[in-house]
Amino acid sequence: MPANLGPDLSMARSFVISADGGSRGNPGPAAYGAVVSENGKILHELFETIGIATNNVAEYNGLLAALRKVNELDPTATVEAQMDSKLVVEQMSGRWQIKHPDMRDLAKQAQQAHPPQLVTYKWIPRDLNSHADRLANKALDGDTNTFAPRQINFLSERLVSNETPTQIFLVRHGETVLTPERRFSGGDGSDPELSEVGIAQAEEVAKAIAIRKPDYFFASPLVRTRQTAEIIQKQVKLDIEFDTSWIECSFGEWDGLSVPEVQALYPSEWEKWVSSSSYAASGGESYEQVAARVEPALTNLAADYPGKKILVVTHNYVIKALAARIIEAPLESVFHLDVAPCSITTINIYPSDGLRVLKGLSAKS
C-alpha cells in the first residue's frame, strides 16, 4: 500500500496574498485590507473594520482574512504571503517570539486557517503594499462614525491615566571625525571613533541621562556608540547590553563619502535617495528597511520591561525612522527631521494596549 505523501503540490494552485492593517490612534479605529492573486490576476479584495485595535493586530487580521479566503478557494494551494510588517513576517516565519497575547491568538488562527507548511512569508517595502493599505483605509473611511466616540486621544485620556508606560530614551552618539564633513558613516562601514568634541558631548548628555535614572541600558556595538555608552555608564552605573538591532543604516558604496561627493559621483541615485524612503544606495539599506529592522526591537523593549526606563545609545537614521513610525507619519518625513549628536529622543509605550507616544525629539537636556 503506497505511503500517504499528502497533497500533490505539482497539481495545486498557487496564490500570492498581500495584507495590511492600520489603526487611527494605535490603538484606535482599526481595519485591514488584503488582496488575493493568482498568476498575476487579482481574484479578491478583502477589507473590513475590526473595532478598536493596534496597527499590529489589524495587520494580523488582514493576513488571517486572506488565508481563510485562499483556503476556501483551494485548501491544498501554496501561498506566498507578502506584508510590509516585518514583525508579522518574522513572527509567522517562526524567527521571532510572539509576546502579545492578542497577536499570539491571531497567529494561531492564521496557522489553522491554511496548512502552515504551504505558506511562505515575504517582507516587502510599504510602497509595494499600497493596494492592501488603500483597502484598509477604504474600510475606515466608510465606517468612521462607528468608532469616533472611542478614538484614543493622548492629551484627553493618557494624562489622567494611572498606568506607568515603558519610557525609552534614544541617545544619538557623539560627533566623530566624519560628522563635521557630512560624511556617510553606516552600520557596516568605516566605524570611526568619537572626536574630542564628541567625547565632550557624551560627557554632557551623561549628566542629563543620570537625572532620568534609567533601569536598563542598551547600545549599538559600533565604536562611536560603544564609546558614548561607556562615558554615560560612568554616570548611570548600569551594565550595557550591546545589540546589533540598533546599528546605523548601511550606506553601501557611499560609506565614507561626503554629501557633495555622492552628489557628484551618483547624481541620479542621490535624487532617488532623497525622494523615496524605499530607495537604498548600492549595497546599503533604505529607510524602509531600517524601520523594519529596528521597530521590532523597540516593541520588544516594551514587552520585556513594562513600566521601566530604558536607555538606548544608537544612531541618527535609526532615531529618525522610529520617530516617524511613532507619530504614524509617512516615512518620507525623515527627510524633514534632524537629530543632533548626543541628543535625547523620548518614547513612551503603554503596556496595556501598546499605545506609543513621542514625548521629545532631539532634546539636549
Image (spheres, rainbow, N blue to C red):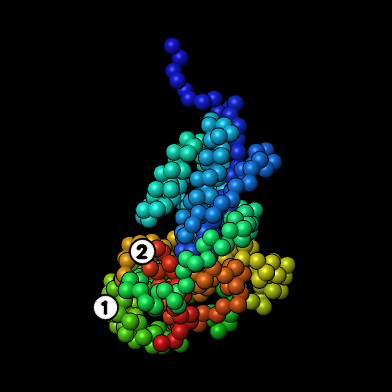
Left/right of residue 162 with respect to residue 314 in the rendered view: left
Label 2 near label 1: C-beta < 8 Å? no
Relative to 15, residue 1 above or below: above
- In-front residue for pair 171/265: 171
- In-front residue for pair 163/35: 163
Give the residue number, with chain letter if any, for mark 2.
Answer: 352
Nearer the observer: mark 1 or 2; the answer is: 2
Left/right of residue 7 with respect to residue 233 in the rendered view: right
Residue 197 percent location from the top left of the image: 46, 87
Q: Residue at x 61, y 43 (%)?
A: 36
Left/right of residue 28 with respect to residue 264 in the rendered view: left
Q: Earlier in the sequence, mark 1 or mark 2?
A: 1
Q: Amino acid at mark 1?
A: Lys
The quadrant of the image that shows the N terminus is top left
Give the residue number, with chain letter if any, for mark 1.
Answer: 237
Residue 199 percent location from the top left of the image: 41, 84
Q: Residue at x 59, y 44 (%)?
A: 17
Relative to 321, residue 116 above or below: above
- Callout 1: 10 Å neighbours few (<14), some, many (20+)? some
Q: Amino acid at mark 2?
A: Ser
| Identity of the residue furthest to the right in this view | 268
Separation of marks 1 and 2 at Cα, in angstroms? 30 Å
| Identity of the residue furthest to the left in this view | 237
- Callout 2: 10 Å neighbours few (<14), some, many (20+)? few
